[in-house]
Structure formats: C-alpha cells, structure tokens
Amino acid sequence: MQQNWSRNLRYTLAGLAGTTLVGLYLGYPVYGLTAGLGIYFLWTLNQTRRLGQWLANPDAADEAPQSLGMWGDLFEKLHKLNQNYLQTRDRLRARIDRIQESTNAMHDGVVMTDASGAMEWWNGAAEHLLGFRRNSDQGQYIYNLIRTPVFKSYFDAKDYREPLELHSPAKPHIHLQIQISLFGEDDRLIVAKDVTRLHQLELMRRDFVSNVSHEMRTPLTVISGYLETLVDNADELPAKWRRAVNTMATQSYRMEALITDLILLSRIETGEQTVNDATTDVNKLIRQICQDARTLSGENQHEISFEASDPHRLKGDESQLRSAFSNLIFNAVKYTPARGSITVSWFTNSLGGHLSVKDTGAGIDQVHIPRLTERFYRADPSRHKDTGGTGLGLAIVKHVLINHDGSLEVRSRLGEGSEFVCHFPVERLVEGPAE
C-alpha cells in the first residue's frame, strides 16, 4: 500500500511538472502550473463528490466507483471493508436469528432486560406464561408488569443463587419458578419455568403425610397403651410371649416417634407453626438440651460440653429452635461411641450467629453429605436398628433453619468425627442478656 501511495504521488507531481513545462514552452510557466493545480483540484472535488454519494448508500452498488491513482486505491479499500462488514453483519444476524428461533422453541419463558429492568426481548413462552404483549410492552419495566413486591425485591437484590417461586401475573393458576442471571453491565436474563405440576404434587405429598400421620396416631396410641399394660404385667405372661410383647412395644414407640416427627415436619413446611418475633435465650436453651443429652447418654458416659462466647439472643420461635438443636445434639449422642466427646458451641461474629455441634464419632463419607437433609435418607442404613432414629431429624433441622433465614453446614470425614453448624443472619441476633 505504501508503494501505491508513493507511485500515485509521483504521478501527481509528474502531471504538475508537465503542465508547468507546457506553460514554459508557451512562455507562461506560472500559468501552466496554476492550470495544472486547478485541473487537479477540480478532479479531486469530483472524486470527493462521488465518494460522498457512494458512502451515503454503499449497499446500492455491487462495485466501487472506478477511478485512477490514489482515489482508485481508496475506493477499492473502502469497498473491501464494506464487503467484510456486510459478511460479518449477515453472519451475526444469522446467529441471532438462530438463537431466537431456538429460544422461541423452548417451553420456558426467556426475557432479556437491561440493568434498570427495561425489557428488550422475550420469547413466545414468556408471552404465554407472563402475559407480555410484543406490540406494547417493548421497553416497559418488567417489575411494572409482574406486580409482585417479592419479585421487585428479588430483581433488585442481585442475589440469584436460589430461584423465586410465584404465581403467573396473567394466569394465576400457573405456578412459576423464576431464575435470573446477570450478564454484560448488570443486564438480566430471566427464565420463567412452569412448575405448576411439581407444586401440586408437593402440596398433595404434604397433605397426604399430614392426614395419614394424624389418622395413624389414634390407633397407634391405643395399641401402644395396651402394649404398655402388657409390658408392665409381663411376669404374668407365658415366657414365649414376653419377648414378642417387648419387641412390639419397642416398635410401637419408634412408630410414635416417627409420626410425631412427620406431624412436626408437616406443620413446619405448611406454615402451621409460624415463626414469631419472640427472642430466645440460646445459652439457656442449649444448656437444657445438653442436660437432656447427658441423660440420654446414660451408661455410655459421653463427655458433653457447652461453650458460649457471648450473651446474644436469637429472634425466632423457641419450640422450633429447640426441635432443631435437640435433633443435632441427640444425633451426636446416638452416633458417637461410648465415652466419646461432644462439643456444643454458640458464638457470633460479623456474619451472624452460629451453633456448632462437634462429635468424635465415625464420621460421614463425603458422598452422603449433600443428601443428609432428605427425608428418611441414611448415610449408614445398617445403624437404623441401633439408633432408633426416624430419619427425619435433619429434615426438620433444615426446614427450621429455612424459617429462620439460616442454613446448615456439615463438615465431616470418615474416622474423624462430624461437625454440624447452624448459621443465622445478623438480623436475627438480639444483643444483651436474657430478660
């Protein structure tokens, strides 16, 4: 390219020199040079006009304007740049069209908004699930169309680790799960999934568990009462019946414990046990539970210690907190060998309040930890008969913590014991000693 410009410059200078020589031959060298410059200036103005007309609509012509010298090179280079731009534009447009076609084929609603929430694009499923209208809703703020305060708070919080569930603003019978992802400069990609069927199944499961548990409690109470009477008078029974009666009594107690936990879990899940605004003296509560745990330990003589760093109280429902804390501490007693140690700690820091229950038991394999809070899940099913647990303790703990804006962390390795830590946010803490 440098060579072309040098060549064009030489041609221009040669032309001016030629007109000057002609003027010199006629006796007017200055007029000859002036005429050459004037001709070159008029030609340059004409090329500039052609360039302006072409740049105004470069797609109208398949070929670039034809010219000589540096103007010809300039037209050719601009034409190549324009062709590359058109190819890149067509390729990107094809990709965008393909993405939009594939997104429109999805059953989930997809919405793109800018950082402020103004809607830029959405697919057909979003129109069905959320009731958006393509002709009138373009550029509208999405939280003005989904008029739910919880959605506005979720949108502004920028904490999208957990999805949000709500009813469709256009079709209230549809239950939606909303998940937001950030991209670009805080732009949002919003995905709305229809989880109506799952929501209905979950409600049916809760109702079924609650109803069956209540229906079973009455006959089981009668059976347990008669078995207790038989156990109290076991000396009057034939020897071959004593073992059977004792086994039935043990199993009936276990069934009663299972039903009690099922009813408690059902009440916590369905909101029958709402979290009140009372404050709980955590130190006093844990000391009581530790004393009960020592009684439960009995002949196993576990070393149970409680450490408290400050007198902070916790805002929440004391009965639910008692259920959660006692499940963790009693589990430590059940799964720790005789004469093992159990350390219970309550402490606070800038992140909130934390209850730690640490034991010297056999530990838990890492593969089981993600599923420990599932109902009836057991890391070691073979220990079911020995511990007499219901398999619902950690599920109760999880839902109690959810009700108190908390979370459960499990730290454990095989052969190294386990530590269960309940985390509560700073907003749940109340300063000062118990009243």
Image (spheres, rainbow, N blue to C red):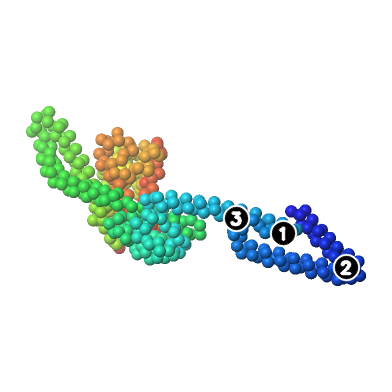
Crowd class of label 1 (few under 14; some 14 to 19; many from 20; radius 10 Å): some
Position of 18 relative to 342 (above/below): below
Three-letter amino acid code of the residue under disc 2: Gly
Q: Residue at x 29, y 59 (%)?
A: 172
Three-letter amino acid code of the residue under disc 1: Ser
> Which residue carries the number 2 mark?
23
Q: Nearer the viewer, residue 412 or 230?
A: 412
**Residue 197 falls left or right of residue 426:** left
> Which residue carries the number 3 mark?
85
User: Spatial distance from mark 3 to mark 2, Cα to Cα?
Assistant: 48 Å
User: Spatial distance from mark 2 to mark 1, Cα to Cα?
Assistant: 27 Å
Image coords of residue 120 (percent x, y) = 45, 61
Disc 2 to disc 1: CB gap under 8 Å: no
Crowd class of label 3 (few under 14; some 14 to 19; many from 20; radius 10 Å): few
Q: Secondary structure at mark 3?
A: helix
Position of 65 relative to 381 (above/below): below
Image coords of residue 392 (percent x, y) = 27, 44
Q: Nearer the viewer, residue 248 or 195?
A: 195
Position of 345 relative to 48 (above/below): above
Q: Is residue 107 at all visible to an observer of this figure?
A: yes
Q: Residue at x 47, y 59 (%)?
A: 187
- Give the mark nearest the N terminus, 3 or 2: 2
- Give the mark nearest the N terminus, 2 or 1: 2
Image coords of residue 123 (percent x, y) = 41, 55
The residue at the far left in this view is 236
The residue at the far front in this view is 26
Q: Residue at x 61, y 53 (%)?
A: 84
> Which residue carries the number 1 mark?
67
